[in-house]
Image (tube, grey):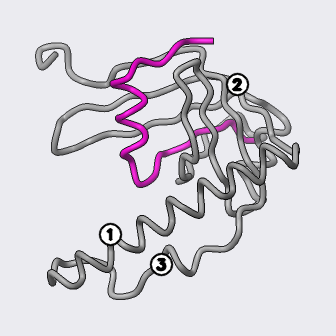
Amino acid sequence: MKRLSDVIVSFFENQGFVIVSTIDTNKSIHNSCKGIVKIEHKGTVYLLDLYRARTFFNLKRNPHISITAVDEHGFKGYCLKGQARLLKQKEIYSRLIKAWEDKITNRITARLLKNLRQEKGHPRHPEALLPKPEYIIAMRVDEIIDLTPHNLK
């Protein structure tokens, strides 16, 4: 397990969503958007999945996973590669669900404030329409790839 620096933890905590990649039955890459609930310096990332669909079935067959996020404005990004577990423990699950609900509340508040300032955005509040999470993915980070071009580091 790789330890995550303060810079990487902060970067991922500030993402609205990340791209999660898994391997499907045809050994093709499947990408989907997920929200990070919690990221720990020790190298564990917790993701919520709102749907029990392709990502779920891919991870049951093959636990290899990657999480990618980029900041276009800052011209930087990271890809975290590792192994996933599907969590079922009630105590951890309820604590992480509460953290997710707090994140959603903050996102709705931020969207309301932007709308009040008349900044362009989604006319409704899609976060409020999201279904309850189906399960939690716990990812053990084994590799960190810095996507920032070498000449800009």
Residue in front for this viewpoint, 22 or 82? 82
**Residue 69: percent from left, percent from top:** 39, 39
Amino acid residing under circle 2? Gln
Q: Is the C-beta separation of discs 2 and 1 under 8 Å?
A: no
Name above or below for residue 145 compared with residue 25. above
Q: Mark 2 points at which residue?
A: 83
Give the mark, 3 or 2, whose residue is nearer the N terminus. Answer: 2
The magenta segment is: 1-24
Quarter of the image that includes the N terminus: top right
User: Are the residues at dot 1 and dot 3 in contact (C-beta closer than 8 Å)?
Assistant: no
**Mark linked to residue 126:** 3
Q: Nearer the viewer, mark 1 or mark 3?
A: 1
Element on which disc 3 rests: helix
Q: Circle 1 is placed at which residue position?
A: 110
Q: Residue at 71% x, 50% y: name it.
A: 95
Could you tell me which residue is drawn at 58 percent across and 18 percent down? Answer: 42
Residue 152 locus on image (x, y percent): 12, 20
- Mark 1 vs mark 3: which is more N-terminal? 1
- What percent of the width, then of the height, locates residue 40? 56, 28
Q: Would you say 30 lies left or right of 152 here?
A: right
Residue at 73% over, 47% down: 136
Q: What's the CA distance linking mark 1 and mark 3?
A: 12 Å
Q: Which of marks 3 and 2 is in front?
A: 3
The numbered mark, 2 or 1, whose residue comes first in the sequence reads 2
